[in-house]
Each structure stands twice: as C-alpha cells, then as structure tokens.
Image (cartoon, rainbow, N blue to C red):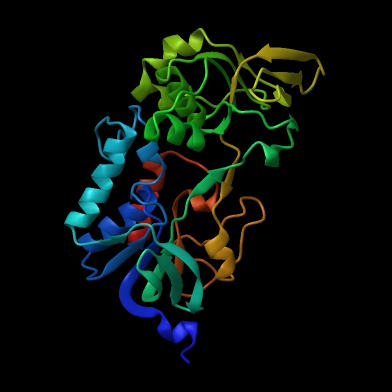
Amino acid sequence: MQSIETKMNQTKTDVLIVGAGPAGLATAIELKRSGVANVTVLEREPVAGGMPRLCHHTGFGVWDLRRVMTGPHYARRYAQKASAMGVEIRVATTVTGWDSANAVTFSSPQGLGVLAAQAILLATGVRERPRAARLVAGSRPQGIFTTGSLQRFVDERHLPVGKRAVIVGAEEVSLSAFMTVRAAGLSVAAITTELPQHQMYLPYLLPKWGLVDMLTRTPVQCSTRIRRVLGRERVEGVEIEHVTAGDVATIACDTVVFTGDWIPEYEVARQGGLQLDRGTRGPQIDGQFRTSRRGVFAAGNLLRGAESAATSALEGRAAAV
C-alpha cells in the first residue's frame, strides 16, 4: 500500500509564494518582469487579492499604483496583472506543512500535493486579535466583530449588522471599519483606543478625505479600554475604563468592532522552523528579506503586523530584486 506522501501530486516551480495579498502578488509580478520563468502563488482563500478585496471603500492604490481605487478594484488589479504576466495563482489551496527544505505540502479541492521550488517567499499576512484574546469580559451576544468578519458580513453576505457601533482601536484599519459600518447605515457611538493618542494620521486620510467631516463628529476616546461587553443575546453596550484615571462609563450600542492588534500569520513559518522575532512574532529577516532558512524569504505584514496595502506591495517588489 502506498504511503500518503507517495500518493501526493508532486510538482516543481522556480519560485513559490505563499499568500496572494498585495505583498505576494507584487513580488510575483516583479519576478516575472525580471525574467523568472515559473512563479506559483498559493492562496488559501477562494479569491486572490488579500484583505483589500473585502474593503469596499476608496483609498487604495495611491502610493503604489498612482491612482485611487476601491479595495476590490485594487485587489483585482494586482491579481489580473499577475495572471496576465504568466503567474500561476492557485486559490483555495492551503499549505499544510513542509515536505523538505525547499518544498511544501498543500491541500486543495483537487487533493493533496507537494510543491518544490528553488526559492520560497512567505507573504501570509496578519490577522486581527479577536475579542477573546483581548480578555474582554462579558457573555457572547450577537453583534461582536473584527474588521474582517464585519466586512465579510456586510460586503460579501449583504447581511444587516445593527444600528449603533463602538469601534475598538484607532489606527488605519479602524478607518476601514468606520467606513464599513457607516456604509451599512450604522452610527458610530465612539472610537476607543488604549493608546494616549490615535493613529489615524493625515496620510491615511488624504485618499479618504470624505472621512474627515464624519470623524470630527465622532468621539475618539484615547487611553480607554473596553472592560466588558454588555448584553446576553444581543450586544446592549460596552463598559469602558480610562486606563490612567480609572474612571468607568457605559456606552450604549448594539455592535462592537474590534480592530487592529495584529498577529502575524506565522504558522507556516513556525512549521518550517524559521526563527521568529520575539517582538513582532513574525520571521526574522536580513536586509534582503532572507529568513533563517536557506532559500526561504518573507515580506509584507507577516513580518511585523499591519502596514498599508501599498507598503506591503512596495516591500514585495523590493523582495523580488
């Protein structure tokens, strides 16, 4: 009887990229421009493009593509460009481990497989820390989201969310959550952050200038943490605490969106035995994006948590050089 390993479909490519977000696709495009014959991208989601494809608002493409576009348009632009240049993009394909020093195992709708490459680049991105990992007390009522789950709920499934939201976090991705809930017809009761100052800076707002007026009418509460989510079947409010003064207050809402507080998607890197940075928890790299494992590189938000899509794409281009 054959072993599982010998039953797997085994193929080869010149460069394998894990992750079809801005960093992975930009790397693939640049590699093809430089003359690399075979570039393969594996993406676990059913559609290439990464997080931007869920962000149905404008503000993408300014710094890397020199034009303003929505997230889905931006994601399609990179995916279509990569495909047009001959990059093989395999969606709904999850890397499950490492077969050898330069090969990974994967699962896809077609079955299990092994893909070997002369070089491998990891661009698996990040994920938001959910409510449970933030140790916020309370029950588990309906109406609690991360930015990603909110956008899937609203923009992919077109389901109603609520009427009044509190957004936890005040950084670039929080703007994305803000625009999503506003587009869904919700008011925003408050934006909270434990930091002493919000991180929604002017360069992020310039491509989204219509936000400025709405944000000036939305309370942004700094040095404030969410102590408890109130409600049993449905969110009824949140209990907040000022982290220095200790003052406690309640905000009525039926929706809570936890944004940011990023965790690198380091599972493939960990499985490969790559050295991880103790601070970022992403792979350690040198100035040429090389990891501790020979022939394996890393780029994009996997390295340190979330930067903009443009930053990841430009970093992907640099990693291909």
Residue 6 lies, with reference to residue 309, above or below; the image says: below
Of the pair 274 and 56, the residue shown nearer to us: 56
Q: Residue furthest left?
A: 84
Q: Position of residue 59 (x, y in %)?
A: 34, 28
Q: Which quadrant of the structure image shows residue 237?
A: top right
Q: Residue at x 56, y 32 (%)?
A: 145
Q: Is residue 126 visible?
A: yes
* In the displayed structure image, the side of residue 66 where residue 230 appears, left or right: right
Q: Position of residue 73 (x, y in %)?
A: 27, 37
Residue 112 lies, with reference to residue 4, above or below; the image says: above
Q: Is residue 258 visible?
A: no
* In the displayed structure image, the side of residue 2 where residue 41 appears, left or right: left
Question: Which quarter of the rendered picture does the C terminus lie within?
Answer: bottom left
Q: Residue furthest right?
A: 246
Of the pair 255 and 36, the residue shown nearer to us: 255
Q: How many marks?
A: 0
Q: Residue at x 37, y 55 (%)?
A: 24
